Image (cartoon, rainbow, N blue to C red):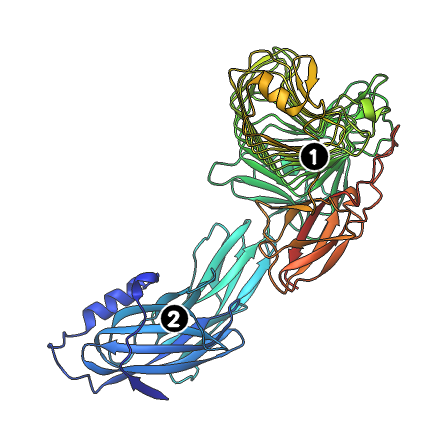
Amino acid sequence: MRLSHRRRGPDIGRIRVVVTLASVLALGSCLERDPTGSRPSSVTTTLLVRADVTGTAVATVVVDVTAPDIPATLVFNVPVAQGAALGTITVPAGSNRTIALRAFDAGGVETHSGSVTVNIQPGTNPTIALVLMPVTGSVPINATLGSFAVTVTPAVRALMIGDTVNLTATILDAGGQPVAAQVDWGTLIPAVATVVSTGQQTGRVTAIRPGRATVVATYGGTAGPATIVVAGWYAAPGGSSNGDGSSQPWDLQTALSGGHGKVQPGDTVWLRGGTYTSAVTSTLTGTAAAPIVVRQFPGERAMLDAKGGTSSTSRGDFFSVIGSYSIFWGFELMDSDPNRTTDTRPNLLVANASHLKFVNLILHDGGIAFFMYPDPVDIEITGCVIYNNGWQQPDFGNGHGLYLKSLTGPVYARDNIVFNQFGYGIHVFTIAGTGGLTNIHVEGNASFNNGAVDANPSNSPNANILFGGSEPVHNGSLVSNMTYFSPNVGVHNLLLGFGTTVNTDLTVQNNYAVGGETVADVGWWQSLTVSGNSLFGSTSEMIWLRETDLSGFQLTNNRYYRDPSAAAWGYINQDYSFPTWQRLTGVGATDQAVASNPTEPRVFVRPNRYESGRANIVVYNWTSQATVPVDLSGIVQVGNHYQVQNVQDFFGAPVLSGSYGGGLVNIPMTGVTPVAPIGGSPTPPPQTGPDFGVFVVTSAPS
């Protein structure tokens, strides 16, 4: 049905329009110009309108047509069915036809709009493509108008390298009648997939290498696309160096060596599920624009076990990275060797190249979980879960979660969860002459109960976070981290500086630290900025400033949760009450001390940087509630299935799961029994519930 009214189409300044070159040439050259003030042409043209509305709430599409010689706006309603709007419009032939499409949901609220101004010729017209941009949200709608509609089936197909698939094109005219005619086939990325014609309206696609390609069937200026996804390369525990990396996976070392030259920048190497047992070295080298990704295959558990993979007489490196511009994502590295009393337990993951990202890895029960050499630049470790690493020495536990050093940086440790190591949690440190501590940034990590499995956890010297070594720190930052020690665990929570090394500069901001004999132990600094931090401990020393000269220290707006009259603020070699400490040190004038803890839980939600629908959740349950409400609205989409894992039993049953209905969810805080270190530990890891809990929420469409 065609209606008319006087309302103009939407503002076209907000939308993005794509018009095919064929459309511009054909429409611009085939029509004579209409004189100003002329009547609309008596010749009309019927155009097919198609719009892909999948993933949106669109229920109706309205098409408006205006032109200087069309006295009243033409309006057409295009019905929506099965994720597509499909219909026809009849337009007077002529120039300067503005065709506007507006999409509405079932309640009549406009969701998308877009328009294009074109010339319409009598008879056949090439296809016009335009994009309807969302009024709210972020999902655009692709639409086409033309004399023919070409569709290709299957519209999407995933292939292994060397596989083929037959495609069929269907042509409909504006009346909806099939057209028997020859289509032309083409591929936008022939390096990924090629296509040849096998008949009037059929073609055959061959997968060449990993990637995504669009294959197009064209007729009468109208194109119908199909998406071909060629899966990346594969490694498997039973793989072979003689495999093709696709239907016949490689072994892990072959894959990490480039698969005989097949793996190229921008490719992905998928690790299939199972246990890999040999030490490996990655030489994969991508580019800044096209890094190579090594990632666990979705829905599977790829576990790299270091047992027997390195020397039995010295601590070796299990997974070494010496190729640059690579991303290592989502798989598990561990050591099933039960020996926890010698220093031969290997470094699980070692970075010795630049421009690397380590994303959402699980590192547990190794010697040192992550170690880096000082020369690489541009290193990011993010979203990793790191626990139960290290070994017991006669005097104390050793073996750390993150061991970071750098001569130039930058190095970023962001949003990792680090707990229950025998040694330090986050260990920003170097021995004199073996590296530097320059441009290292520790942000948004949860580090707790490191050293708790030591033979003497209450006197363990291993901090949740150490920032300092035998070389000075330059341009460091410690921002928005969350730490915790259970009662009777830990001497140093935050250890800022090591020994008597005089460091250059560090920013310590918005951290939330609970427990330990000393919450913040501060060494020697030329410039130190400490602001907006919250320190807790009913029997803890709040902060200890070891240096006499504090002229380079700036302490502002920090909050200490301890009775201000207690001798819990240290300066040089003595503890003082908070007011006396302020007077003697001359710092912390805007700091505050309060005698009681908060009266409600404190919840931190840290979105994952690389996986949508995933976040770290840290809960300080000051009121010991059985459950704590947490808002997941910025993380999980309504209707998606979600699950919440307590990291102390990361591979166990989720503590909460379901279909997300929006708003708050109540996370159980009763706690779980932490997974014990493989081979045992002198002291069992403490359960932190209900007082404290760290969780990972993941989600996916239902």
Give the answer, above or below, for where 34 lies relative to 657: below
Residue shown at the point (85%, 37%) measured from the top left: 676
Report the number of numbered marks.
2
Q: Nearer the viewer, residue 625 or 407?
A: 625
Residue shown at the point (59%, 59%) measured from the top left: 158
Q: Secondary structure at mark 2?
A: strand
Q: In which quadrant of the rendered image does the C terminus lie? A: bottom right
Q: Secondary structure at mark 1?
A: loop
| Residue 545 visible to an observer of this rendering | yes
Q: Residues within 10 Å of mark 2 (few under 14, many from 20)?
A: many
Where is residue 332? Give x, y as percent.
72, 40
Q: Identify the residue position indicated by label 1 in the image.
A: 595
Side (left or right) of 579 relative to 397:
left
Q: In which quadrant of the rendered image does the N terminus lie? A: bottom left
Identify the image quadrant of residue 482: top right
Identify the image quadrant of residue 575: top right
Q: Identify the residue position indicated by label 2 in the image.
A: 144
Side (left or right) of 206 relative to 691:
left
Callout 2 touching callout 1 (CB < 8 Å): no
Where is residue 167? Give x, y as percent.
52, 67
Side (left or right) of 8 relative to 224:
left
Q: CA distance from mark 2 to mark 1?
A: 67 Å
Label annotation for residue 136 = none
Q: Give the amino acid at mark 1.
A: Ala
Q: Nearer the viewer, residue 606 or 422?
A: 606
- In primary-sequence order, the first of circles 2 and 1 is 2
Give the answer, above or below, for where 142 lies relative to 577: below
Q: Give the amino acid at mark 2.
A: Thr
Where is residue 196? Give x, y as percent.
47, 62
| Residue 201 visible to an observer of this rendering | no
Q: Nearer the viewer, residue 274 or 562?
A: 562
Where is residue 619? Give x, y as percent.
70, 45
